[in-house]
Amino acid sequence: MQLENMPRYTVHVRGEWLAVPCKDPKQTIRCLGKEALRRYIKNKPDNGGFDSLDNVKFYLRRCKGLGLLDLDDTLEDCLEDNDFVEVVMEGDVMSPDFIPSQPEGVHLYSKYKEPVKYISIDGESLRTEDLLNLGKGLYKIRLTPDAEQRVMQSRLLIESIVQEKKVVYGITTGFGKFARTVIPVSQLKDLQVNLVRSHSAGVGKPLSPDRTRMLLALRINVLAKGYSGISLETLQQAIEAFNACCLPYIPEKGTVGASGDLAPLSHLALGLIGEGKMWSPKSGWADAKYVLEAHGLRPVSLKPKEGLALINGTQMITSLGCEAVERANAIAKQADIVAALTLEVLKGTTKAFDTDIHALRPHPGQVEVAFRFRSLLDSDHHPSEIAESHRFCDQVQDAYTLRCCPQVHGVVNDTIDFVKNIIATEINSATDNPMVFAARGETISGGNFHGEYPAKALDYLAIGVHELASISERRIERLCNPSLSELPAFLVTEGGLNSGFMIAHCTAAALVSENKTLCHPSSVDSLSTSAATEDHVSMGGWAARKALRVIEHVEQVLAIELLAACQGIEFLRPLRTTTPLEKVYDLVRSVVRPWMKDRFMAPDIEAAHRLLVDQKIWHVAEPYIEKYRMEHIPESRPVSPTAFSVDSMSLSNASVHDPQDHNDNQDRDNLQELQSSLNDLRTSP
């Protein structure tokens, strides 16, 4: 058999990757394992710790899905050419030296299917929702024709700079402190490769496949704007790697958020040039050159400026920020549903959600949250036997954790909208340095790489969203405390023998306390780097990562409240709540049964958490909320305050902002009369 036609397998043995050719496809899996072990110990001074291969007990598994292989099956029956497999020796799994080939949560990727739909990337119109879907692997990427033209035009300018031997930062000079060091033309390619290698200095766990996909997709989107000077060929190679799900190893720590996210983006570029580690559903973690080759791809050969083009920008902060803002939005909507269910169980009043109250303080988030509560709890629209049972009680008002949900949840919604606006701008922004302006025929050094915008926004997001957990934990306390809820202590029968939700509440309290520390803004810190050249930084990478941790904790606290509220319903039966909340209860009970006595609780919390992460609670309640909205359209709209002021400029502005006032002579006369009276008051003794 000729060598080029010989099947070859890439085998992982104790952290090393070995290319093992196979002369006979009818050989067994056991033979492949022994040959891989033979190659592994061949150059080891101590034979890898083995006396003899005959005494080594091992098994093999495919890297894709971690499926075990029968040692007696033939290679041709179980494996394909260029397949990735792993040899695991008996005893190694429990060893601290054992290096698994797959990232955490591999079960989520074992059923990965290559997408067939595309998102067209132009650098101008990517939405946060699009980026999240690209991260989930739901779409492939392709460039628009306009983007291709812009990329080619900017590349022509870079090539002319090189040909004319001009001195331009990052193209013909060193970087940072070495900006004044001119590099010979013959070494310009080495300059870019050295940049990527030296800047690949991150530490910590690798980003998950979803987050790596988001980072790669976002960098492609920025390059598609045509201000980076990258060649179309290199950009297409990055797109091909994305579409094949070939994802570089990117440690999560190491960026200070200016000059951009240099360390993580360098690791991204390192994989694209065929160095370092790379992951795909087919291969697991392997040497990047093997993964690319297995997918029929070539490593990128960097041209002048291209290393810098790949690594300079805020895409790490922004891609994680995109996930954070979308998850925050999802949990904020569902927090209203969970809180409404708790209010029903605690037999609270809906009077605090009256339309007229919130019209007097018309923050959009507050008005919307109050509306959602009405849509879920309006007994005239959705009769509630629980509400009817205490209609004539003497309780006038509820505790703040129930009564003030529109005010507390509302500002969270407004915070999310504010942050989303910043992130939406950032994902379609050019954040390189220098910027390549093809139309002007010049490059300009600037500071768009500074991550202060997303850093500050994500610190604000963490502070805002945390409040959902803070108020939720207090509602859990009310549910568990019999003196406040009139329910059995800790929501369980035979208290004492059973502890019920006692420690679940402690878990919620622990998460809220941890969030208080995580909400300290990282962007208030700055450490000078690069020999004082980069003397102010954003620390946006940590802002993004801790925002995600805060949001996950919020989801978990609300999952505990959701379970506690549903358990409270059990003690109010046979009474039923409103139709939408009964649907929520039914959904929870489809994955978590009631507590008749104590049992292992952590899996139930995780099941409820998964309902929230997948937005299933929202999907159940949303049709009822939107139907109510259609039937109450005027009241669902936030009311704008009338802008009256005591100076003529404000009066003028009021008339401009409100056309009805501007066109109504009577109203204008009344305003002028008011102004005259106020002026008289000012001049009176």
Image: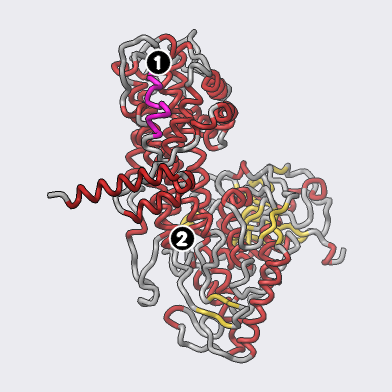
Q: From the image, which quarter does the N terminus lie in? A: bottom right
Q: Label 2: which residue?
A: 203
Q: Label 1: which residue?
A: 492
Q: Residue 103 appears at what percent x and percent y? A: 57, 49
Residue 17 appears in the rendering: yes
Instruction: Find the residue positioned furthest to the left.
Output: 685
In this view, 549 is above or below 214: above
Q: Residue 487 appears at what percent x and percent y? A: 36, 14
Disc 2 crowd, CA 10 A, few/some/many (<14, 14-19, 20+): some
Residue 26 lies within the magenta run: no
Residue 355 lies within the magenta run: yes
What range is drawn magenta here? 346-359
Judge from the rendering whether residue 681 lies leftward or rightward of residue 76; answer left or right. left
Residue occupying image coordinates x 38% and y 41%: 466
The kind of secondary structure element at disc 1 is: loop
Front-lying residue, 441 or 643: 643
